[in-house]
Image: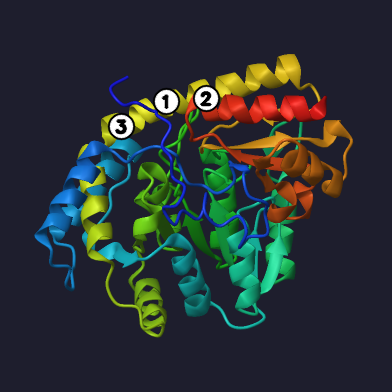
Amino acid sequence: MKYNFDEIIDRKNTNSWKYDFSAELGKPDGLLPLWVADMDFRVPPCVQDKVKEGAELGIYGYSEAKSEYFNAIEKWYRKYHNYKLKEEWLVKTPGIVFAISTAIRAFTEKGDGILVQPPVYYPFCDEILHSSRKLVTNDLHLNNLHYEIDFGDFENKIIKNNVKIFILCNPHNPVGRVFKNEELKRMGDICARHGVIVLSDESHCDFVYPSHKHTVFAGIKKEFEQITINLTSPSMTFNLAGLQVANIFIANKDLRVKFNKAMAKTGYGRLNYFGLIASQAAYEGGREWVEQLNQYLQSNIDFVRVFLQNRLQGIRLIEPEGTYLIWLDCRGLSLNEEEREDLIIKKAGLWLYSGRQFGGCGEGFERINIACPRKTLETAFYRLLKALG
């Protein structure tokens, strides 16, 4: 490979949320962290070069993006995701969760129902509850180690709870599903029929594994395009979360006006200078890096699969179709939540994300970030094996 994803980079004492805040987050020191969605790889060289160039200028005043910024994103989505964007649709925010919070305030009132599909990225639920909206759940069902949608429950929950917004997560975090076109179409038809706005979080869309294909939800039908807030970001793809940049696309002008009004009430202004230049550089020159990264991630998944089959039969891999976050079924260990936490933290010295964090149906599961050097991943699983005795 051209890029060295095996390099071990010491991130301690860099104000890293992943490495330097164990005490503040109630964890003991010295744990090997595989929890938060933060890769342990350097960003593409083209991004490093552009950020260095910008830093050397020495002036960091108010900044905004020119059309070249949009053009880089548009080319990426047209070429790699078969979806044509328009510049007037673009609204830039400091993150996807910020955009979801803004959309909730823009399109719903207190008490309105908002639908999610647990086990799911927990900030979705947090934002719903913090906004005094009604959290409505359409749990994904595990069938032969594969998560499936209960479409009857999906529509019934929308009708019964007068749902106004559905938050779609595709590729799905944490279960790793990449929903098929027919699944998305069926959900979209239900939402369109009942006047439900779709917040489509597609932040992991560039991590999709062989035999699977990401479909931009808004691109399936013009009807869907008019009810969708398309949530994209370079943060996951290029490891830019710390630069706080997301690109939100809203084709429906009325929805876009309401969204912008809600955002204006937050007092938020423009993205930071480095976020803008890093995002543009990544989309312009980072494709080869992403392709090689995907190959490396697939080899990490292969390692985990074989290790579990041969050495840890009590833990089963939910085969990921996308994302660099793998979902492990640990129910075969016959441990309750407290016992499993004791095993993982105290005995194995690991910091993972408990499945319970993603909703009640995540009980007995663990989420692990595999976007790390192979040696780190091997160390984690051998620690777990040793802890199990």
Residue designated by label 2? 375
Residue type at mark 2: give it.
Lys
Which of these two is toward me, 152 or 56? 56
Residue contact between numbered discs 1 and 3, judged by CB atoms under 8 Å: no
Quadrant containing the N terminus in the rendered view:
top left
Residue type at mark 1: give it.
Asp
Residue that sits furthest to the left in the current view: 57
Say whether residue 215 is left or right of residue 342: left
| Label annotation for residue 206 | none
Q: CA distance from mark 2 to mark 1?
A: 7 Å
Residue that sits furthest to the top in the current view: 310
Residue contact between numbered discs 3 and 2, judged by CB atoms under 8 Å: no
Give the mark, 1 or 3, whose residue is nearer the N terminus: 1
Residue 7 can be seen, yes or no: yes
Q: Nearer the viewer, mark 3 or mark 2?
A: 2
Q: Nearer the viewer, mark 1 or mark 3?
A: 1
